[in-house]
Amino acid sequence: MDAADDELLPISRKSARYRLSGKGGDCGCTGVNRKHPWTKIMGEGKGTVLSIAAVFQVLVATSVILAVVLWSKQPPDVPAVVLEKCSGDAISASLRHLTSEPHTAGTEADTQQAQWVAEQWRDQGLDTVNLVPYDVLLSYPDPDKTNTLSVKNGSGHVVWESQGRQTPLWPGEDHPGVLPSFNAYSARGLVQGPVVYAFLGRDEDFRYLDDHNVSVSGSIVLVRYGDVFRGNQVLEAEKRGAGGVLLFLDPGTVSPEGSYDNDTYPNTVFAPPDAAQLGTTMMGNGDPLTPFYPSIESAFRIPEDEAAVPKIPVQPLSYSDAAFLLGHMGGPVAPKEWQGGLNLVYRLGPGLQEPSLTTSLSVHTHNANATVYNVVATIRGAVEPDRYVLLGNHRDAWIFGGVDPSSATASMLEVSRLYGLLLQKGWRPRRSLVFCSWAAEEYGLVGSTEWTEQFTTVLQGRAVAYLNVDMVFEGTYSFISMASPLLWGAIVRAARMVPNPDPKEAAAGRPTLHDTWVHRHPNPRHPGRPKFLGLGSGSDFATFQHVLGIPCMDMDAPSLPLYHTLYETFHLARQLYDPDMAYHVALTRTWALVAYFLSHEDVIPFSVSLYGEFLTEALQDLEEEYSSLLNQTQTELGYLRAAVSTFSVAAKNWTAGLASVDLEDAMAVRAANDVQMMLDRAFLDPRGLPGRPHFNHVVMAPSNSNTYTSDSFAGLQDLLHDLPDLPPKEQVTRWRQVREHFAAVTHLIRAAAGVLTQEIW
């Protein structure tokens, strides 16, 4: 077992004593009778009269000690309550209500759901509940003019037209609030031009088309939905002069066992032929008109034509519509890996096989101002009420949101219900718990981004961690998490306590959630450990982690065939995925336990040494991927290696030193926790990443080519990725940027090591 594995094991800190140390020396804040650091500032041995500041410190220390005494006498066994009282029936009841009607952000139904969530939290006995409004720019289809792709013959008559709406297949799906198919923030307009198939719409896909003399300029680009964020797909097409974009679901991905027979929804979880995936196309997070600042009454709003939204029309297609289009495409045959699940040969275009046929895309989607509401509730901490452990999930859905997000909203309401029961028993967490129901996440993390922009100063100073769940599952293959390395140990510890929701796995000798996680998603470098995914973007943790440096968790897994379609319903979640609500219960328990560890334990259970391990391995990966280029930066690379090594040593020493912090000394515990809370913040560059000022974390950030995924040392990867393809003069400029960012990353990692050693200068 690796030494760092200790941080992945359950630990008890109630009877331990901890000592904070830098290079083996006393930092001046340990021991029962030691002098605190502020005595060096106030002076020693100069009489018995205390300054006002010193009196204040005594009062604060006394109040904290009194709070600790009262808090330490409180019951009950919180993990037992979480594991025994978590109710699948309660989660199911909430899920049924949340999915009873469409509730797209900014609609009346969305506002009513915000009020309903607030009412649940008041009834559960949470200390404070508030609705926080923001006036933002959203986007909607025209209910009377559906967006369509048309094919006309030489006489100008329409011979085929795509469907503007998805076909209802289960009771309730014909609700009048169901919107036509659209992609948010698409430009409106009419585009006439040939169709070109560009596979996943990545930079390399468009370069393939260039290499084969297939131009997308002025064309309608047909792109397949996949693991790439649709905003990146549209941006790549727009950069190359495309007139419009069509985003289609391929049955090879969303219906590998079904397609045109009964092995699709509503009988199975696979997508039926008329399924179309809605979703935003905006690059960036938050209200498009108030970048960097909250969209409150006093905000300055930029003109709409300056917003980071597409300037070309975009529309989703079902695979039944895509089949007609691809079946009539002309041009060369697409590469083997570009072929899909339709029973036909995929061709590149441009245009259709019949020269007389022409295509036109008509989009009526429009932007509109709307008021959206976050709902924020708190349970006040007994000892450190000014330290916050936040749990969050967004509330808005494109249509019914049976999985995304209502499965997780229902689970969060169950977490808060459990903590409400504990409050009734006289228990309070040491630190405050904050429950957040975010608005307009689907449009681009709007509600959470505006809130973090409004309360940046408070959150950076006081937030311990943010625990996000977007949806309970995207499948039932296995639990998996993405998280800051600081949270790895707490998540593993919780997963080890939660019974396995999969009876077949339990029967195979894997009784816990963690056992299946390790079995199905093993860590390739560390046998016996589970794999963690990197924190990219695409959900509400993004601003917390990548802008504010607050360690985050998200619990998710890839692949949901009916994601963002009409068919993501209560029937899908409750009957097809989780008839016994076992997976909902398992994730709810895990979420609640991680929150308990972070909010309750004296010393915040952060996996500090694992962060050093993460940095070491991330640098190894960077060197392997860009070995030939990095040969030209040996000096800079040497400095970065040394900084990572220094940080790793400091992280190990810090973890070992925690064994001597005096838990009976409230100020010593506070000092230890303050150091740990600073750690992820230390990696923030106030100038942002090169070319991406919206992201500040130099160690982990969303990939520039696919914001769903995460890149380690993302700024360096961005700069190195296309460097060899640049003209010579531009390469000179780029190399300067590479060296400059090397220096910034090196400095910030050294600074983070200094946080742990507590060396100010």
Image (spheres, rainbow, N blue to C red):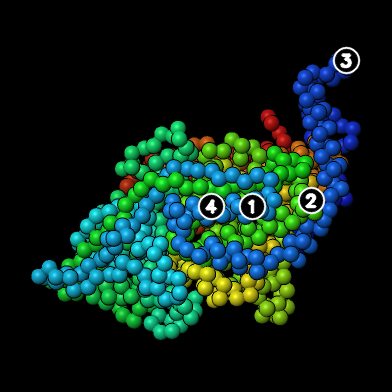
Residue 499, position in %: x, y?
A: 72, 70
Helix or strand or loop: what does disc 3 sit on? Answer: loop
Q: Residue at x 87, y 32 (%)?
A: 34
| Amino acid type, mark 2 | Trp
Q: Which residue is mark 1?
A: 121
From the viewer's perspective, is the residue at label 2 or at label 1 nearer? Answer: 1
Q: Nearer the viewer, residue 300 or 370?
A: 370
Q: Which residue is mark 4?
A: 114
Q: Which residue is mark 3?
A: 47
Helix or strand or loop: what does disc 4 sit on? Answer: helix
From the viewer's perspective, is the residue at label 3 or at label 1 nearer? Answer: 1
Spatial distance from mark 3 to mark 1, Cα to Cα?
Answer: 53 Å
Residue 175, position in %: x, y?
A: 41, 67
Spatial distance from mark 2 to mark 1, Cα to Cα?
Answer: 17 Å
Helix or strand or loop: what does disc 2 sit on? Answer: loop
Within-10-Å neighbours for mark 2: few <14, some 14–19, many 20+? many
Q: Which mark is residue 427?
A: 2
Spatial distance from mark 2 to mark 4, Cα to Cα?
Answer: 28 Å
Q: Residue at x 43, y 53 (%)?
A: 107
| Residue that lies at the very extreme toward the left in this rendered image | 155
- Say whether disc 2 or disc 1 marks the residue closer to the N-terminus: 1
- Say whether disc 2 or disc 3 marks the residue closer to the N-terminus: 3
Is mark 2 in CB contact (under 8 Å) with mark 1? no
Residue 127, position in %: x, y?
A: 69, 45
Tell me the quarter of the picture where residue 398 sits: bottom left
- Say whether disc 4 or disc 3 marks the residue closer to the N-terminus: 3
Helix or strand or loop: what does disc 1 sit on? Answer: helix
- Above or below, 160 against 483 in this view is below
- Say whether disc 1 or disc 4 marks the residue closer to the N-terminus: 4
Within-10-Å neighbours for mark 4: few <14, some 14–19, many 20+? many
